[in-house]
Image (cartoon, rainbow, N blue to C red):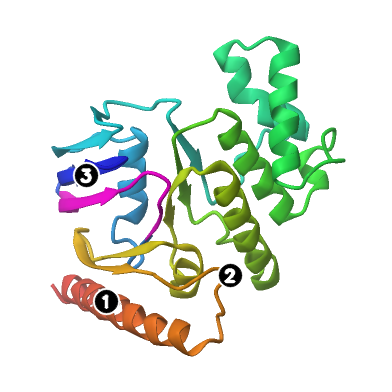
Amino acid sequence: MGKVSLKNITKCFDDLVAVKNLNFIVEDDEFVSLLGPSGCGKTTVLRLIAGLEKPTKGEIYENGKIVTGPGPDRGMVFQEFALFPWRTVIKNVEFGLEIKGLPKNERRKKALEYIDLVNLEGFEDAHPRELSGGMKQRVGIARALANEPDVLLMDEPFGSLDAQTRNIMQRELLGIWEKTGKTIIFVTHSVDEALFLSDRVIVLTARPASVKKEFKIDLPRPRDRAGEEFAKIRHQILAEVEEEVTKAIASERKKEDN
């Protein structure tokens, strides 16, 4: 059944069908990226897996159990940094552990471990306003990991970062993934990012989202973005995505004409 399994998932918002008959499986320790046109339903899929939304039809399984709502087995990292501005770095990382009721010494020890993992040692007592964008996102990743989820869900976590910082964060995320062995489901608009990071890339159709095509990425890591094989696969994925983008644009124009 895999670590996470989506079976015949449909999600409707009033008259809008966001996801339709979506099926895919993510294996244990796998890094999977979801790609597709803007507005196709990628974030909705992630929120369904997180339990923040409920499917209209179908079932989602995590570790063989039906997902019925949010749980500590699934951690979420958002594009917006979503940090508490009045809390220091360590207090932000400790937040979920506080909710769990862990003793102060225990949660501090655990928070420090994950702050070190994301290379923020020395910034434990800094506030979010004192941090760069990349550092803020590291805090968000550390906070999600501190709860020790089985699955890490990431919704365009590097989308607001400049290109150089984004590349650095991608490399750091791979290091974290390799150290922790987490299953990661990653939403992105960037074909290059998906190809650099993932074991597998799932291309979704224009809304309503369903699986258009899957690409298993067998390139060794670290991956050479300028390499011939990287460019070849990037071209193949981009062609699939662009076809769906064209469909999405045509659909919007048709609505406007009507």
Specify the farthest residue to the right.
122
Asked whether 25 falls inside the magenta stretch, the response is yes
Marks 1 & 2, CB-CB < 8 Å contact: no
Residue on which the image places disc 3: 6
Q: Is residue 227 above or below residue 21?
A: below
Give the number of the mark in front: 2 or 3: 2
Asked if the magenta segment contains residue 31, the reply would be yes
Q: Which label lies toward us, 1 or 2?
A: 2
**Mark 2 vs mark 3: which is more N-terminal?**
3
The span from disc 1 to disc 3 (Cα, nearest Å) is 27 Å
Q: Is residue 45 left or right of residue 129?
A: left
**Image quarter in which the C terminus is found:** bottom left
Q: Indicate the quadrant where residue 211 lies.
A: bottom left
Segment colored magenta: 16-33
Task: Say which residue label 1 marks.
Answer: 249
Q: Which label lies toward us, 1 or 3? A: 3
Q: Which secondary structure, mark 2? A: loop
Image location (x, y in percent) of residue 245: 29, 76
Cα distance in 3D space between marks 2 and 3: 30 Å
Left or right? Give the position of 103 relative to 19.
right
The N terminus - image quarter? top left
Residue density around tag 2, few if under 14, some if 14–19, many if 20 or more, within 10 Å = few
Q: In the depicted view, which residue is nearer to us: 176 or 60?
A: 176
Q: Which of marks 1 and 3 is nearer the N terminus?
A: 3
Local SS, label 1: helix
- The residue that label 2 is drawn on is 222
- Figure disc tally: 3
**Residue type at the position of mark 2:** Pro
Residue 89's spot in the image, x, y percent? 76, 35
* Residue projecting furthest to the bottom: 228
Mark 1 Cα shell of 10 Å, populated few (<14), some (14-19), many (≥20): few
Asked whether, in this view, residue 217 is left or right of residue 55, the answer is: right
